[in-house]
Structure formats: structure tokens, C-alpha cells
Image (tube, rainbow, N blue to C red):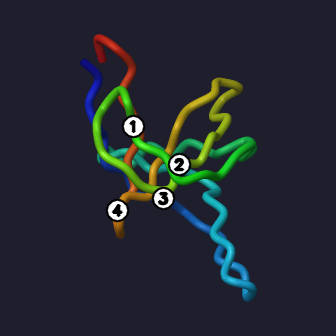
Amino acid sequence: MAKKIYVDVILHHSKEGRIKPLAIVWANGVKYAIDKVTQITKAASTVAGGTGIRYTCYIQGQPRYLYLEEDRWFIESHKGG
């Protein structure tokens, strides 16, 4: 089973109150830009457990789910990783 990987997230927070993640930062300091966000919805992670606001993002051309769970961000690990 995959697990949650908590990450730092660089955001744009608009004056209208919208939050747009711009990049994720791993614990080792490596930063990956988020190419685009295609969907924002309340959802549960069926892979890693947990629930929150799910951002469907493209990072280096690959779709990934990024979750805002209360006040922490996590991304689902890939199986086996």
C-alpha cells in the first residue's frame, strides 16, 4: 500500500482567497514545479488514506494527487516507493 508523504508546498494565495500550489519541496530540499492544476475537489485518498482537498496536478508531465489535509499537505507515494 502506498503511503502519505508530507511535503512543503509553495503557494499563491489570491486576494479572493483561492489557493494555487506552485511547487512541492521534499524533505531533502529538492523542489519540483507544478506544471498545472487540472482539478480541485474534496476527496479521500483511497491509496494512502486520509481526506481533504485534492488537487490534481501535473509535475514533470505526470499526474499526481496533492492533498491539503486540515493544515498539512501530502502527496501519495508511488507503489513500491
Name the amino acid type tagged 4.
Arg
Task: Choose the circle earlier in sequence order: 4 or 3.
Answer: 3
Is the Cβ of the residue at disc 1 closer than 8 Å to that at disc 2? yes
Q: Kindly report the distance in space between the C-alpha atoms of the residues bearing marks 1 and 2.
A: 8 Å
Per the image, the residue denoted by label 2 is: 54
Task: Choose the circle earlier in sequence order: 4 or 2.
Answer: 2
Q: Secondary structure at mark 2?
A: strand
Is the Cβ of the residue at disc 3 closer than 8 Å to that at disc 2? no
Per the image, the residue denoted by label 4 is: 72
Q: Kindly report the distance in space between the C-alpha atoms of the residues bearing marks 3 and 2.
A: 14 Å
How many labels, in total?
4
Q: Kindly report the distance in space between the C-alpha atoms of the residues bearing marks 4 and 1.
A: 14 Å
Q: Which residue lies at the image location 35% right of the left edge and 69% below the top edge? A: 71
Per the image, the residue denoted by label 1 is: 45
Per the image, the residue denoted by label 3 is: 9
- For the C terminus, the image quarter is top left
Compared with residue 17, is residue 79 higher up or lower down, i.e. above or below?
Answer: above
Quadrant housing residue 57: top right
Q: Residue furthest top?
A: 80
